[in-house]
Image (cartoon, helix red, strand yellow):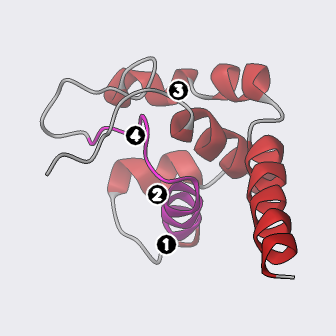
């Protein structure tokens, strides 16, 4: 029974990951606006702009949603996120989450 539960949990994670990555071409196109500050693949070299590449998908969705709603304040990001749809936010989050960039070092 425990093996079955672990298998189902892993399958759920895999399906969630696949759905996040479902539209990478569209997401890459949408990310062109972000590239000026965050780099073409989300690996910003400017200290004023955070690296998005490899960031957690859910974190990116939350951050963009908060910029869109105004809950998170940044003049540039509030303006850029204002016209994003939920699908745009999810596509962008998936695109950046799947890029090579951030890594945890201990």
84 left or right of 42? right
Q: Residue 78 carries which label?
A: 2
Q: Does the magenta stretch include residue 85?
A: no
Residue 103 falls in which quadrant of the image? Answer: top left
Q: Which residue is drawn at 40% across and 40% down?
A: 52
Q: Is residue 6 above or below residue 76?
A: below
Q: In this view, does 47 lie above or below 8?
A: above
Q: Which of marks 4 and 2 is in front?
A: 4
Residue at (83%, 46%) from the top-left corner? Answer: 19
Between the C-alphas of marks 3 and 1, the distance is 19 Å
Asked whether the beta carbons under mark 2 and mark 1 sit within 8 Å of each other, the answer is yes
* Distance from Cα at disc 2 to Cα at disc 3: 13 Å
Write down the residue under mark 1: 70
**Residue 84 seen:** no
- Alpha carbons under labels 3 and 4: distance apart: 14 Å
Q: Earlier in the sequence, mark 3 or mark 1?
A: 3
Circle 4 residue: 52
Mark 4 vs mark 1: which is more N-terminal?
A: 4
- Position of residue 44 in the picture relative to residue 84 (left or right): left
Q: What element carries label 4?
A: loop
- SS at badge 2: helix
Residue nearest the observer in this picture, 21 or 38: 21
Mark 3 — residue?
Answer: 33
Q: Residue at x 49, y 53 (%)?
A: 56
Specify the quadrant of the image occupied by residue 18. Answer: top right
For the magenta stretch, what is the residue range?
50-68
Q: Where does the image place residue 75, in percent across and percent down from the top left?
A: 35, 55
Q: Is mark 3 on a helix, strand or loop?
A: helix
3 and 4 marks in contact (CB < 8 Å): no
Q: Earlier in the sequence, mark 2 or mark 1?
A: 1
């Amino acid at each position: 029974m425990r093996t079955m539960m672990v298998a189902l949990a892993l399958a759920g994670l895999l399906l969630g990951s696949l759905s996040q990555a479902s539209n990478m071409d569209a997401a890459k196109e949408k990310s062109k606006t972000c590239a000026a500050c965050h780099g073409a693949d989300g690996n910003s070299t400017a200290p004023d702009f955070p690296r998005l590449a490899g960031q957690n998908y859910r974190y990116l969705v939350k951050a963009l949603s908060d910029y869109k709603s105004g809950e998170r304040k940044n003049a540039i990001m509030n303006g850029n996120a204002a016209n994003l749809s939920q699908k745009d936010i999810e596509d962008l989050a998936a695109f950046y989450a799947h890029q090579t960039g951030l890594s945890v070092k201990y």
